[in-house]
């Protein structure tokens, strides 16, 4: 059989390839308009929260410790106005088999792939998710291919990405390494089509349902340790699955008053698909280059409808600077004796900033840590930055310019909460949702959907639709 | 000039997936000027020379052809090839603050 494997031909087969590789017919959730049936799509995984807990326990995933960061809380209080300084707790997700919360997501996709009889599983990721899929595939005796954006055109790769590649290979997976560019998806589709493997998409329902246990555990552990729910849970925001799944788990646990904050590293000015900018970033995930577009345009993912819908759940979005996250990574090591991250400490950095604004009786939970080691550590990452002509210095992180310098705060009191404009994000989301289906009109179902998907209200949605010249039919 | 590599050795091959002119429109100009490249590792299927087009069998059993570029590729990163002394200051600073020794 000779298939046309040109870029255009493979892209045209996208829907069919994804359907075969996920076992999901996404068309059944469409309404024909802006709305789609998100909750039905989520419940069609066929797994209850209890089922997911059981699947994860079988493979040693989840049930990670919740630890109070007492010295960091003390540091907050010593550097904040009197009476301020919330207590900070962290969910030590590095205790999962491959060293990050991503095992929760991979566990369900791999279980599903096995159940449906696939011989192997594939994922397109340069992050910890690759190792998670490789690890889970090993446990369930499936072959595994990870497709990774890895090098610039000089074949130079960031130490963090190279480490993630090594880890996948050492867990028995094949890693296809690519140079910079969104056409990675083309290579990925060809792999799926040629191998017939399951697509462990980060944006599939399985990938999100697996994170629900994280939010659920946080609520249960807080009730046991503190007798109440946390006031704030902070999740690092990239593709949105981390925040979405955690929030859904908290809701399933009945923690309805807990606020969900997202946090991303500010990489403003660096283009994600630029060959030149590729190695000027010291963070390869958890940054605004993913965090913003995936919040405002979730459906540009590798499945037709993303299950990761940030704005449906996020109450506020904080940005932090690269220098601040490296600084907090050192603080976590030196004050708490926990070597973790750095990328996973994005939400810790945001928590530190937020804690300085809150009263002492408030509780913040940082919902993840990740493993660290060669390549994935401030030492190699800052050494690499210096080699790429990025200046590493102490100063005021507010003045940091991504791609030019990394400013380690002169003092921890310089780590401050920077709030993204949620209204702007929500408007941008609605615009993208309209464009996604080429809508010229919106009915009651569309409006209800947009209200839920932006956690806003009717007036806001109708006003935004009007500004986009979309006719309202009610 | 060429090195003979034996069948069965663990190697890396390279291929051009898309030439610059085949790349999609929605990418920055600097990326448009360079090809989309791919590297993958596997066991060499026939004796070959470095720089030749060679076929490999990957760890999942796929057969892939490309230019032979490396044999027994090593992981060269570690904890950086220069020390970053700036990091030392952070731990000392925050310990002082927590212990109430900050001036």
Image (cartoon, coloured by chain):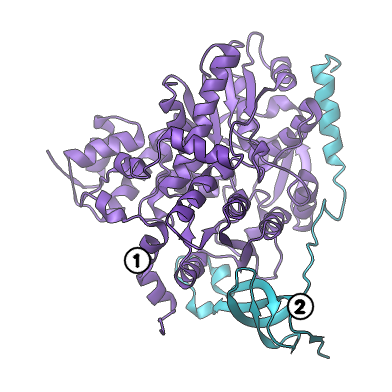
| The C terminus of chain A sits in image quarter | top left
A276 to the left or right of A303: right
Helix, strand or loop for disc 2 = loop
Q: Which sits in the foreground, A95 or B38?
A: A95
Query: Mark 2 sits on what residue?
Result: B9
Can you give x and y, in whole percent of width and height, for residue A441 in the image? 17, 48
Give the chain of mark 1.
A
Q: Say what secondary structure mark 1 lies in.
A: helix
On the rendered image, what quadrant is the N terminus of chain A found in? Answer: bottom left
In the picture, residue A307 is in which quadrant?
top left
Report which colour depicts chain B. Answer: cyan
Q: CA distance from mark 1 to mark 2?
A: 37 Å
Circle 2 chain: B
Residue A199 screen position, x and y as percent = 47, 58
Query: B99 or B62: nearer the eye?
Result: B62
Q: Choose mark 1 or mark 2, whichever is in front.
A: 2
Q: Quadrant of residue A466?
A: top left
Indicate the position of residue B27 as horizontal and vertical percent values: 50, 65
Q: Nearer the viewer, residue A14 or A382?
A: A14
């Amino acid at each position: 059989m000779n298939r046309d494997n040109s870029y255009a031909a493979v892209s045209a087969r996208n829907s069919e390839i994804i359907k075969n590789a996920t076992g999901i017919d996404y068309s059944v959730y469409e309404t024909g308009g802006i709305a789609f049936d998100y909750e039905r799509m989520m419940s069609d995984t066929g797994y209850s929260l209890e089922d997911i807990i059981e699947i994860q326990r079988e493979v040693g995933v989840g049930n990670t410790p919740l630890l109070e960061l007492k010295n960091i809380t003390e540091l907050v209080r010593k550097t904040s106005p009197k009476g301020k300084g919330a207590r900070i707790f962290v969910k030590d997700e590095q205790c999962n088999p491959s060293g990050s919360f991503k095992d929760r997501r991979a566990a369900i996709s791999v279980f599903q792939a096995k159940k449906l009889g696939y011989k192997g599983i594939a994922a397109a990721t340069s992050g910890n998710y690759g190792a998670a899929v490789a690890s889970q595939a090993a446990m369930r005796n499936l072959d595994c291919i990870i497709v990774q954006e890895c090098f610039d055109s000089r074949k130079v790769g960031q130490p963090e990405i190279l480490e993630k590649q090594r880890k996948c290979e050492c867990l028995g997976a094949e890693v296809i390494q690519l140079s910079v560019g969104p056409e990675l998806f083309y290579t990925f589709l060809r792999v799926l089509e040629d191998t017939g493997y399951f697509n462990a998409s980060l944006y599939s329902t399985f990938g999100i349902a697996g994170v629900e246990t994280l939010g659920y555990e946080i609520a249960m552990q807080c009730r046991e340790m503190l007798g109440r729910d946390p006031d704030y849970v902070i999740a690092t925001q990239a593709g949105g699955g981390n925040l979405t799944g955690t929030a859904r788990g908290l809701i399933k646990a009945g923690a309805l008053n807990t606020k969900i904050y997202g946090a991303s590293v500010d990489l403003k000015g660096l283009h994600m698909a630029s060959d030149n900018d590729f190695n000027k970033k010291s963070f390869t995930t958890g940054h605004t280059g993913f965090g913003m577009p995936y919040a405002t345009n979730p459906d540009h993912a590798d499945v037709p409808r993303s299950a990761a819908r940030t704005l449906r759940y996020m109450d506020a979005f904080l940005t932090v600077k690269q220098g601040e996250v490296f600084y907090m990574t050192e603080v976590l090591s030196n004050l708490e004796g926990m070597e973790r991250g750095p990328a996973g400490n994005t939400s810790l950095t945001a928590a530190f900033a937020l804690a300085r604004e809150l009263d002492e009786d408030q509780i913040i939970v940082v919902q993840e840590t990740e493993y660290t080691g060669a390549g994935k550590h401030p030492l190699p990452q800052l050494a690499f930055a210096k080699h790429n002509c990025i200046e590493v210095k102490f100063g005021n992180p507010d003045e940091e310019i991504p791609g030019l310098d990394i400013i380690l705060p002169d003092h921890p009191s310089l780590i401050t909460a920077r709030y993204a404009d949620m209204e702007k994000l929500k408007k941008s989301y609605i615009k993208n949702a309209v464009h996604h289906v080429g809508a010229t009109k919106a009915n009651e179902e569309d409006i209800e959907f947009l209200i839920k998907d932006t956690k806003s209200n009717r007036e806001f949605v109708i006003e935004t639709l009007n500004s986009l010249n979309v006719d309202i039919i009610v | 000039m060429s090195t003979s590599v034996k069948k069965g050795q663990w190697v890396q091959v390279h291929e051009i997936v898309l030439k610059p002119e085949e790349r999609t429109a929605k990418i920055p100009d600097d990326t448009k000027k360079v090809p989309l490249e791919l590297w993958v590792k596997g066991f060499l299927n026939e004796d070959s020379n470095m720089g030749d087009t060679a076929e490999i069998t990957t760890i999942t059993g796929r057969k892939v052809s490309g230019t032979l570029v490396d044999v027994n590729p090593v992981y060269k990163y570690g904890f950086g090839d220069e020390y970053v002394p700036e990091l030392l200051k952070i731990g000392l600073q925050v310990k002082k603050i927590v212990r109430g020794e900050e001036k």
